[in-house]
Image: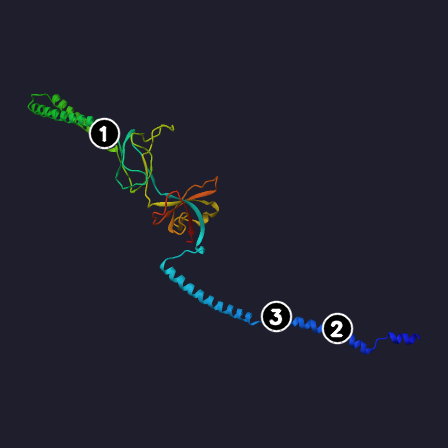
Amino acid sequence: MSADKLKDLQIQPEQKQRRQRPFWVIVIVVLAVVLIALFFARPWSPEKQRRMKGAGDAGTNSVAGDNSAATSASAASTNSPVNTNDNTVLTVSGYIINRERIEISPRFLGVVKWIGVKKGDAVTNGQIVVLLDDTEYRARLAQAEGQLATAQATVAKDDLSYQRVHQLASTHIESQQAEDDARLLLEADRAGVKAAEGSADVARTYVEWCTIRSPINGVVVEKLVNPNELVMPQSFGGTRGPSTALLAVADPKDLQVEIDVNEADLSKISLGQKCQVSPEAYPDKTYDGVVAEIAPEADRAKGTLQIKVQILGPDHFLTPELSAKVEFLKQ
């Protein structure tokens, strides 16, 4: 009985084959799904081949483009040199200044009578810009000229006296002492003429100083006084004292850029080094420059040294006190 039960429980080989079929079916289905997924993924698709081919063409084109760009760059460098970033060792910002700003001051205490210019006017060397009241100095000149005329008349009179005494002394009518006295008096009179001439020259100089002229060709950058104001060459020390200057003039074609360079960058700068200057207001404008001045003393508090770059060929786009960028080029 137990043997029959065991026989019934035994699985026949035919049934084993039938039960194994679904497993292979599952395997085949999975492989089919994988193949379909790989087919749609198409890593070897013609599109990729086209892309690869396009990349090769692009590489060819880029080589040709580089060659054409190099040709264009060489042509551009022939016409006008272009500085690249590789040629710049340091870039610093500063302010545009006039190389020389001259404040015209009177030589003595006086009153402004007339001003012939205003701020922004162009002036030439020797042009009359201010007249001071010269009434007092013309009176002194007239007085000095009168004293000179008197001294000259005295010389003429004493010269005649000396000639007479000299003739009489030669015939022993007058004594030798009388002749000597007449001669010494004439010499004293001639010395008095020279003194009178000097006084007249001084008075004439003061009259000329009342007419103030521009010392340079430039532009009036500041007007410091008005007519009828009292001016003098030195201040009294108080804020309400007379003005010490009349006008400030500068040459607009003589400009520099004043910058403060960190002490760590000083090794990159030398006197006469070429630069490129670009005003912040007009970044598309570029001007050639050269290091014209290196301060002999540093600012210990800021750890900087002042450098002045001379701008070569400035134009009306450059305005003093505006900021500018300076690129120091390799030597």
Q: Nearer the viewer, residue 183 or 143?
A: 143
Query: Residue 290, relative to residue 4: is it above or below?
Result: above
Q: Which residue is mark 1?
A: 203
Q: Which residue is mark 2?
A: 23
**Mark 1 vs mark 2, CA separation in Å:** 132 Å
Judged from the image, the secondary structure of the residue bearing numbered disc 1 is helix
Amino acid type assigned to the residue bearing label 3 in the image: Phe
Element under label 2? helix
Q: Nearer the viewer, residue 146 or 159?
A: 146
User: What amino acid is labelled 1 in the image?
Assistant: Ala
In the picture, residue 25 is in which quadrant?
bottom right
Q: Report how far apart the C-alphas of labels 3 and 1 lie in the structure.
A: 111 Å
Disc 3 target residue: 40
Question: Residue 130, position in %: x, y?
Answer: 27, 35
Residue 303 x, y percent position in the rendering: 48, 42
**Where, quadrant-wise, is the N terminus in this rendering?**
bottom right
Q: CA distance from mark 2 to mark 3?
A: 26 Å
Give the vertical position of 29 relative to 273 (above or below): below
Q: Position of residue 62 (x, y in %)?
A: 47, 66
x 42%, y 63%: residue = 70
Residue occupying the point 71% across, 72% down: 27
Name the N-terminal-most of marks 3 and 1. Answer: 3
Marks 3,1: beta carbons within 8 A: no
Would you identify the image quadrant in which residue 176 lies?
top left
